[in-house]
Image: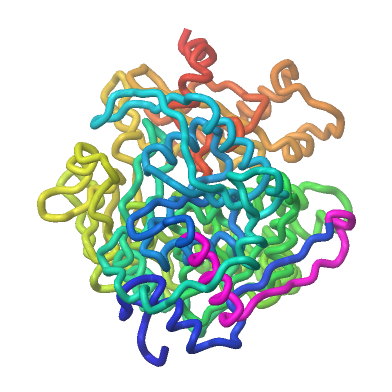
């Protein structure tokens, strides 16, 4: 491709095929292979070249074409991140059709809503678990929630075909497996690809829906190609790096990483498939694959970094030589970080401790990210400052960035040579316009920014003004060097009975500085004081109580006492109106499966408020 970028091509498919022809023998991706009969055994990494992948993509396109799929038709993908996801996406785009992203963690009615709203005709399903969900919404009516532009309704899904990545599709005329598609289909004629216009709709990505039904964001070929070029232009993705891809490709952040792998000479590393019948995530397997993949750049979301930090801190709480060494490492690293940040002198003891534990700091980095690691790129939610400082002190570079589904996707990111903890960095490229409105709301305009929501004109008018600025709903500020700081969410600001405005995330970050508190949700809208709901890190709790047995968080008075101590310590750092006066401890964590987290691990505050309504009211009685 020489000095050209994907943005020089007319559409995403054309950019992919040009890249494939220029690097035919270069490996596009590799993936860990897991033997289900020997889960803990050696994992081999196998991959495919651009020449091989091009043939697979064209055959997928050929099969879809034989089903009558053409320009503007909708084809959905319901799957975890895997190579087949990207190959299916590019096969869809080759026809000028529209790729609809669906999280595999969604329930049947939630999937039904997206497929109905987008008028999807064909679905790529990961496995039998997803196939069963689709069958339920093809055989029974489901509720379609209302919106500003449509009344509630009932619907039943009709599909031309379901294509299975894994599983036996025999005995069903409506289902075919991907291997059969690849073996039986003819490659699509690429002469037809050039006719797809740059401003044509390429994908619909539905917002996670922390409030109300999800909205399909209208993403064009131009939007995606511009953002790939902007990501290359910012310097973070230089020298054709290897990129770890385990975040859900249904989210635009992960999809940008996928396009960087397929539209440039960079190489992708995919986690192995632990189950061929279920889409349930396996974090322990991910952890191993991230370490063994040895990728240069690892995109993450903050919750994953919080879990990593908790794991290291739990080791520091243990007895014996191992625990003592980790404690010394963390203490020396923290002291060195503070001295460097504040421009103060390091004590002799801390300087010696920092120097002697250098090898262990490197060992921790290798244990988390592998030996060829450069940095992690954090997105999807705000990275708590203490988490950023923790990894920075250990020499692990975290580049926090920012973007939204509507900005397709990344707008800002820190650079390795110029990073500021607490900031999401400057814009990626000069053609991304950033403005702070009078009320502090962050606005964007540029070639990567979507023009609106699919079939939602009222919602579109509410978020895009007549000058083309997208109103993010986030509150922020920009410093003199162009670094953007996110300070709150416009709709999530808590206004107490006394009129005090509190951004809940900032208080929750202070509360979670205690290793005992795993998750925190602050509440207090219209109330005289703030309360909080907590989930606990059980390993850290056992260490604090010096108890290795079963602990009942509801009846054991020691638990309330130790959590109360952590809350009082946090309150010392907060203004009086921000302080937590009362709290409740939950037995179960907030998760995607129980519906309290979005697929990108953001808390669904409205769901939490409804589910625990009586408990919350009790905190005010």
At a point 29% along the width and 29% down the height, the residue shown is 147
> How far from the left and from the top, in percent, is residue 323?
81, 54
Screen quadrant of the N terminus:
bottom left
User: Up-down: is 191 above or below 276?
Assistant: below
- For the record, the magenta segment spans 36-64
Q: Is residue 346 above or below residue 442?
A: below
Identified at 29% across, 39% down, the residue is 490
The residue lying at 47 percent from left, 19 percent from top is 610
Residue 111 at x, y = what percent? Answer: 49, 38
Determine the residue located farthest toward the left in the rendered image: 466
Q: Position of residue 256 (x, y in %)?
A: 45, 64
Along the viewing direction, whichever of 288 and 184 lies nearer the viewer: 184
Instruction: Let me know if residue 123 appears in the view.
Output: yes
Nearer the observer, 354 or 223: 223
In the displayed structure image, the side of residue 260 where residue 587 appears, left or right: right
Residue 425 belongs to the span the image colors magenta: no
Number of numbered discs visible in the structure rendering: 0
Residue 444 pos. (x, y %):
24, 57
Residue 62 painted magenta: yes
Specify the farthest residue to the top: 621
Above-or-below relation of 220 to 589: below
Which residue is painted at 20% across and 57% down in the image?
435
Q: Is residue 374 left or right of residue 231?
A: right
């Amino acid at each position: 491709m020489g000095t050209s970028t994907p943005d020089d091509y007319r559409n995403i498919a054309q950019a992919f095929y040009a890249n494939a022809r220029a690097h035919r023998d270069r490996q596009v991706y590799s993936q860990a292979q897991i033997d289900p009969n020997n889960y803990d055994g050696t994992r081999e990494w196998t991959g495919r070249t651009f020449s091989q992948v091009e043939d697979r993509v064209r055959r997928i396109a050929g099969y879809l074409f034989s089903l009558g799929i053409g320009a503007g038709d909708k084809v959905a993908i319901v799957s975890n991140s895997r190579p087949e996801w990207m190959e299916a996406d590019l096969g869809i785009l080759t026809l000028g059709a529209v790729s609809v992203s669906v999280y595999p963690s969604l329930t049947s009615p939630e999937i039904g809503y997206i497929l109905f709203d987008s008028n999807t005709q064909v679905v790529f399903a990961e496995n039998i678990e997803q196939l069963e969900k689709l069958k339920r919404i093809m055989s029974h009516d489901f509720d379609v929630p209302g919106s500003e532009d449509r009344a509630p309704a009932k619907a039943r899904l009709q599909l031309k075909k379901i294509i299975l990545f894994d599983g036996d599709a025999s005995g069903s005329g409506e289902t075919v497996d991907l291997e059969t598609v690849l073996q039986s289909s003819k490659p699509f004629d690429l002469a037809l690809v050039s006719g797809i216009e740059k401003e044509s709709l390429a994908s619909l990505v539905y917002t996670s829906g922390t409030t109300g039904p999800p909205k399909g964001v209208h993403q064009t070929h131009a939007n995606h190609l511009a953002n790939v070029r902007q990501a290359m232009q910012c310097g973070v993705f230089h020298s054709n790096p290897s990129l770890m891809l385990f975040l859900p490709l249904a989210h635009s952040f992960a999809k940008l990483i996928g396009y960087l792998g397929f539209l440039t000479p960079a190489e992708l590393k995919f986690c192995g498939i632990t189950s061929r019948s279920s889409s349930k995530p396996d974090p322990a397997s991910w952890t191993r694959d991230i370490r063994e993949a040895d990728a240069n750049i690892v995109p993450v979301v903050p919750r994953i970094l919080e879990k990593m930090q908790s794991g290291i801190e739990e080791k520091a709480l243990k007895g014996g030589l191992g625990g003592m060494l980790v404690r010394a490492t963390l203490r020396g690293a923290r002291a060195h970080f503070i001295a460097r940040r504040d421009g103060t002198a390091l004590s002799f003891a801390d300087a010696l401790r920092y120097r002697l534990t250098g090898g262990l700091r490197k060992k921790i980095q290798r244990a988390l990210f592998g030996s060829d690691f450069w940095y992690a790129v954090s997105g999807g939610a705000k990275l708590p400052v203490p988490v950023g400082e923790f990894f920075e002190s250990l020499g692990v570079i975290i580049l926090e960035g920012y973007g939204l589904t509507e900005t397709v996707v990344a707008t800002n990111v820190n650079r390795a040579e110029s990073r500021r903890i607490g900031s999401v960095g400057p814009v990626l490229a000069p053609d991304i316009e950033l403005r702070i409105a009078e009320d502090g709301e962050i606005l964007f305009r540029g070639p990567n920014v979507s023009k609106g929501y699919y079939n939602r004109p009222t919602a579109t008018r509410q978020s895009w003004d007549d000058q083309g600025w997208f109103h993010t709903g986030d509150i922020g500020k920009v410093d003199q060097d162009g670094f953007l700081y996110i300070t709150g969410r416009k709709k999530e600001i808590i206004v107490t009975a006394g009129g005090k405005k509190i951004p809940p995330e900032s208080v929750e970050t202070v509360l979670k500085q205690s290793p005992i508190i795993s998750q925190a949700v602050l509440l207090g809208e219209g109330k005289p004081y703030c309360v909080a709901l907590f989930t606990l890190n059980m390993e850290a709790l056992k260490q604090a109580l010096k108890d290795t047995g079963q602990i009942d968080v509801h009846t054991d008075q020691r638990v309330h006492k130790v959590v109360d101590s952590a809350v009082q310590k946090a309150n010392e750092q907060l203004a009086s109106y921000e302080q937590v006066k009362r709290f409740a401890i939950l037995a179960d964590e907030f998760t995607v499966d129980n519906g309290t987290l979005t697929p990108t691990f953001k808390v669904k505050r409205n769901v939490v408020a409804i589910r625990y309504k009586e408990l919350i009211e009790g905190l005010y009685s």
